[in-house]
Image (spheres, helix red, strand yellow):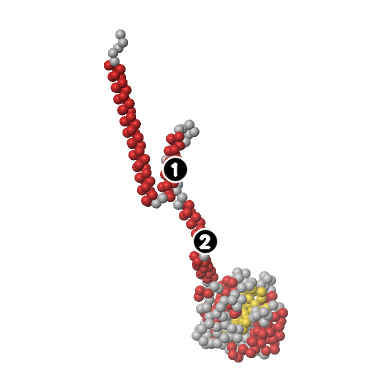
Amino acid sequence: MPLEATMIIIDNSEYMRNGDYNPTRLRAQEDAVNVVFTNKTNANAESMVGVMTMAGKSPEVLVTPTTDLGKVLNALHETKVGGQVDIQTSIQVAQLALKHRQNKNQRQRIIVFLGSPLGTSEGPLIRLAKKLKKSNVAVDIISFGEEEENEPVLRAFIDAVQSGDNSHLLSVPAGPHLLSDLVLSSPILAGEEGIPGGMDTAGGSGSGAGGQDFEFGVDPSLDPELAMALRMSLEEERARQAGSSGAPTAPAAAAASSTTLSNVPEVPTANMIPIDMDDDEDAMLQQALLLSQAEADGGAGAGAGEEDDGDVEMDADDEEENEEEAIARAIEMSMKSAEEESKDSNKPKPK
């Protein structure tokens, strides 16, 4: 909602003692004022709401525009019932209170709760409506209890003050519903935010009484944190479904890349033989053999591993055979040298 300064005019006439609205017209009106104040201040932290009466000896400002709900509730609790309403003078006093608001950037709005007969003609109200329109003051009227009798005059007043659909008339007949619920779901509070389930400005009841048609079944004006959490959860679920049906997301691609890299075999450094430029070719060949065995172990499966084990065993057998042949040759050479020595010893010495 935009930044606003709002004056709420309540009806404190004798008609407010009637019990056709639960529990009485006066208490139902107090609950609705509480809902309006909470909705306005939650929608914009800098918005302010004031309260005044329009019956008794004369209209009286109870609380100037404020953000303190406690002041408003205390004023409503101390309101005295009596007398007849004077809607024309009350609207003029409310306009004067808004004119002296502290923050001039706040839009001006007057919300009138009317639960008794008007007692005035249409002409003066039409002239007042034109002045309000020139001053950019929006007016919302909530008519209950005597809505049928007041409908023609109030409709003419709203049509005259209307500017860009900024003013509304809500007529609420008596019934089992709560006045505060119907005000909450009406265009008076829901129109600018586009919340569904409101009532039309002619007073017909909508399908969303009590906030039943709000998104996720939660009224964002009463519990904004829960509504935001549900909305974020829905967005995350949509992103997850989009990611599963299309290309992999960045975290999934990174995980796949890390999995691919993890399959690359590591060269065992414990078996590495340092190579010196002065070493012979056998050491270099042994180094190459170890590297090739490491690559074969990393890329092959279990069967290949068994074959590698067989190759290692064959290499070990070849080494043993080479050692045995070398020993046999050494024995054979030693035997030949011994025979030659014995032959030389048996030859006759020259005289």
Q: Is residue 220 visible?
A: yes
Task: Please report whichever mark, 1 or 2, sits nearer to the chain's N-terminal start.
Answer: 2
Q: Mark 1: which secondary structure? A: helix
Question: In the rendering, at what x and y percent does residue 140 appear?
Answer: 62, 81
Residue at point 50%, 59% (across, down): 252
- Count of residue discs: 2
Of the pair 230 and 147, the residue shown nearer to us: 230
Picture quadrant of residue 45: bottom right
**Number of the label disc, if any, that sits on residue 291:** 1
Of the pair 257 and 84, the residue shown nearer to us: 257
Q: Mark 2: which secondary structure? A: loop
Looking at the rendered image, the quarter that the N terminus falls into is bottom right
Question: In the rendering, at what x and y percent does residue 184 appear?
Answer: 56, 78
The outermost residue toward the left is 346
Residue at point 39%, 51% (across, down): 301
Of the pair 181 and 319, the residue shown nearer to us: 319
Question: In the rendering, at what x and y percent does residue 68 appear?
Answer: 58, 71
Picture quadrant of residue 92: bottom right
Q: Which residue is mark 2?
A: 249
The outermost residue toward the top is 351
Q: Is residue 39 above or below residue 21?
A: above
Looking at the rendered image, the quarter that the C terminus falls into is top left
Question: In the rendering, at what x and y percent does residue 273 appear?
Answer: 44, 38
Residue at point 62%, 80% (across, down): 111
Of the pair 100 and 36, the residue shown nearer to us: 36
Dot 2 surroundings within 10 Å: few (below 14), some, or many (20 or more)?
some
